[in-house]
Amino acid sequence: MAAPTGRDTCECKPDMAAVKAVSSPLPLALRIVAECPVTKARACVLTLPHGSVNTPVFMPVGTQGTMKGISAQQLEQLDCQICLGNTYHLGMRPGPELIEKANGLHGFMNWKRNLLTDSGGFQMVSLVELSKVTEEGVLFRSPYDGKEILLTPEQSIGIQNSLGSDIMMQLDDVVSSTVTGPRVEEAMHRSVRWLDRCIAANQNPHRQNLFAIIQGGLNAELRRACLDEMTKRDVPGFAIGGLSGGEEKDDFWKMVTLSTDHLPREKPRYLMGVGYAVDLVVCVALGCDMFDCVFPTRTARFGSALVPWGSLQIKQKQYAKDFQPIDPECECPTCKRHSRAYLHALFKSDTAAMHHITIHNISYQLTLMRAVRQSIIEQRFPEFVRSFMRRMFPNDEPHPSWVVDALASVNITLNR
Ligand SMILES: [Zn+2]
């Protein structure tokens, strides 16, 4: 266990030694291919140590202890260019030493493309009941053997250095987006201090990119202050954190757009924990490049298949004799091979049904983002958004007001 730095950093002062450490050429390049002239949407190519990533991109979760429902090979077949590895589970079991021996997480998973790992902190705060945040780090009780463990920013980066991911996330002080008051401000300042400790701890700045995470809850002033401080550091990319945790959608999109307004144009912007199709399309319009969410894979396990008109509950009786694929327009291996009726029957007896729907759902997300990207390149993104929303909310179904307002803020009027 690494010793805490014990540094009594004054609030938000950049650590120049740490800043310098990443000033050498970054193992990341962002090329802006096209910008939408109407909205804040953009299409880029992000070059990372394990190949290029076309953005906007949805990043599926590739590891959750064991891979739930999809293999590295299948992700590759879906032309997934980057996926997530879960630091918390991998850091506990099999443990970073073993993964390091297997040539990092790439070798362990046999995944040749890019990987993003989280700091591990979020899982501890959200999954482990007994967790406590101090200036040193996150203190929690191991769910495996009950021992107390302290996860410091240095250790989080140490684990992620062992995993060898292409993008690492800083340890941040996570507060639920529904919490208000002084705790939010404390967490924001602490996240800035922990960012400096993470930058200083990174042993591989030449091949592993550390992303900062913007915090500040739903308070515009705190978000702005966090943006001001964090963008002073020359980190390779920025994430927008602390959202998508049950807050009002009106607060959500306003914090997203405020963040993209202040983030540097030449660096990637990653909106954490967002994965509903409608949210993805809106947040691309607001200027975000990267997204992740467990939703598409989690919902698949309950028999929910994502389609351009919402979702289809494969367990429902109406699909028992329906011989169409989940989505006749979908090109995924599941839709090419299996009918709704088959999946419906399979769901009753076999976990393979979950697996087939997981593949379809990931394919849906990746295909959606490719279509979004193509429309930005072809300068018809606003029209794409309108037709996407017409399909998602057909007939007289009203568009959610937050969608209307968020899109109006970037000059897209939804006609109804
Ligand atoms: Zn499909």
Image (spheres, grey):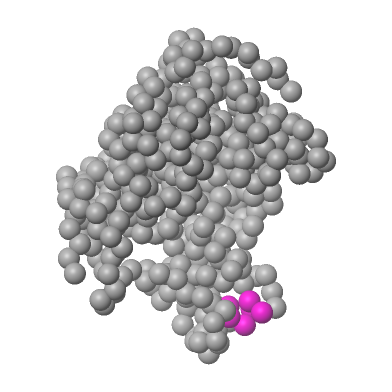
Region of the chain picked out in magenta, as a range: 343-348
Residue 153: where, in percent of width, then height?
A: 60, 25
Using the rendered view, name the quadrant where residue 225 is placed: top left
Quarter of the image where the C terminus is located: bottom left
Residue 119: where, in percent of width, then height?
A: 58, 34
Q: Is residue 364 above or below residue 236?
A: below
Using the rendered view, name the quadrant where residue 353 is placed: bottom right
Residue at the outermost bottom position? 321
Q: Is residue 261 above or below residue 225?
A: below
Residue at the outermost top position? 17
Residue visible at 54% across and 77% down? 314
Residue 21: where, in percent of width, then height?
A: 49, 14
Residue visible at 41% across and 20% down? 233
Residue visible at 45% across and 54% down? 275
Q: Is residue 299 above or below residue 97?
A: below
Total numbered labels: 0
Quarter of the image where the N terminus is located: top right
- Residue 274 lies in magenta, yes or no? no
Residue 200: where, in percent of width, then height?
A: 55, 16
- Residue 345 lies in magenta, yes or no? yes
Name the one closer to the observer, 397 or 307: 397
Would residue 237 be visible to someone looking at this image? yes
Would residue 292 be visible to someone looking at this image? no
Q: Is residue 140 left or right of residue 343?
A: right
Using the rendered view, name the quadrant where residue 156 is placed: top right
